[in-house]
Image (cartoon, rainbow, N blue to C red):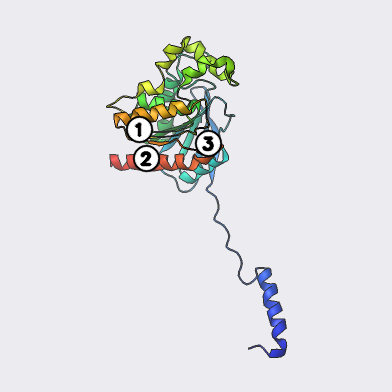
Amino acid sequence: MVDDEDYPGFIRRVTDALSHETIFPMATPPPEPQGCWSTIDVAGRACDLYEPIGVRRHGAILYLHDAAEPLPLPFSHDLRAAVAASGLLLLAPRTGPSWWLDRVMPRFDRMVTPERFVLEQVRSALERRFDIRPPAIALLGSGMGGQGALRISYRHPAAFPVAAAIAPAIDFHQAMREIDLRDDAASIEPLWESYGDVERARQDTAILHVHPLNWPRHQWFASDPSDRDWHDGAVRLDSKLRALGIPHTALLSSCGPDVGTSVAAAAISFVVAALEQESRRLA
């Protein structure tokens, strides 16, 4: 009990104590998920590897980079944070402007195509080093890598039943036609070197590899209407999948000024849920 004469002093002491958090200290925020980044060699090519520490899910993300992404570690802060929170291993091959096609691209390799490298050598490395094999491997990509993730999964849905793409560069044949008007002309030149013709390239785009009876069970892609280079292709892919009754998720409304940042968490959440479904499917 406090005497009336000492009451003002008591209030002052309590106020001072609260202001210095000596009575009710603030709770410490939980630590962010931790992991280890490194670079490994796969068939003579550098690949960026993320391995989670602590809680770890069985499965892996195979990340296909865009032509313009900086290497190594080609990820935005938001995408890296979402990957860390997922508990999944991530492997990102560095291939330059290869477009992830089943075409010989001299700037990549004069014998092995980028698609075969992913399908055979990278996939084999995941199995040999980490005991991860299909269907526990999800393809994720951005831009050039986004179209690669979709296209490879359409061609090999049993090996890659999960595909997610951020701002996928689906209609790359259009970029070939407009190469003289583009700021990224250097990244388009390998397409001309490989195809030599716009129509030949068009016939090899992801949309034309969609099979009405054999498709990846989990598809997700996001594109912003402000993306004048690639948005129309994403819209056309969505229309074709709808017409064929193929389940998919397409985010085609405004995603903000940086689509890679705004949808990163959604992309990884989709991948985690899809791989979880695949694991139960095999059980």
Check the picture and name the quadrant holding the C terminus. Answer: top left
Query: Residue 161 shows which numbered tag?
Result: 1
The spot of residue 257 in percent (x, y) is: 56, 37
Q: Identify the residue shown where x is 40% and y is 17%.
A: 204
User: Is 259 situated above or below 116?
Assistant: below
- For the residues bearing labels 2 and 1, Cβ distance under 8 angstroms: yes
Q: CA distance from mark 2 to mark 1?
A: 9 Å
Q: Nearer the viewer, mark 2 or mark 3?
A: 3
Q: Hey, what amino acid is under mark 2?
A: Ala
User: Is 264 situated above or below 12?
Assistant: above
Q: Residues within 10 Å of mark 1 (few under 14, many from 20)?
A: many
Q: In the drawing, does residue 271 fall left or right of residue 41? A: left
Q: Identify the residue shown where x is 65% and y is 68%.
A: 21
Q: In the drawing, does residue 198 fall left or right of residue 5? A: left
* Mark 3, residue position: 260
Query: Residue 96 shows which numbered tag?
Result: none
The spot of residue 19 in percent (x, y) is: 68, 69
Residue 279: name its quadrant. top left
Query: Residue 274 shows which numbered tag?
Result: 2
Q: Nearer the viewer, mark 1 or mark 3?
A: 3
Residue 110 visible from this viewpoint: no
Q: Hey, what amino acid is under mark 3?
A: Gly
- For the residues bearing labels 2 and 3, Cβ distance under 8 angstroms: no
Residue 131: name its quadrant. top left
Q: Residues within 10 Å of mark 3 (few under 14, many from 20)?
A: many
Of residues 126 and 191, the one drawn nearer to the viewer in this rendering: 191
Check the picture and name the quadrant holding the N terminus. Answer: bottom right
User: Is 81 situated above or below 21?
Assistant: above
Q: Identify the residue shown where x is 51% and y is 11%.
A: 193
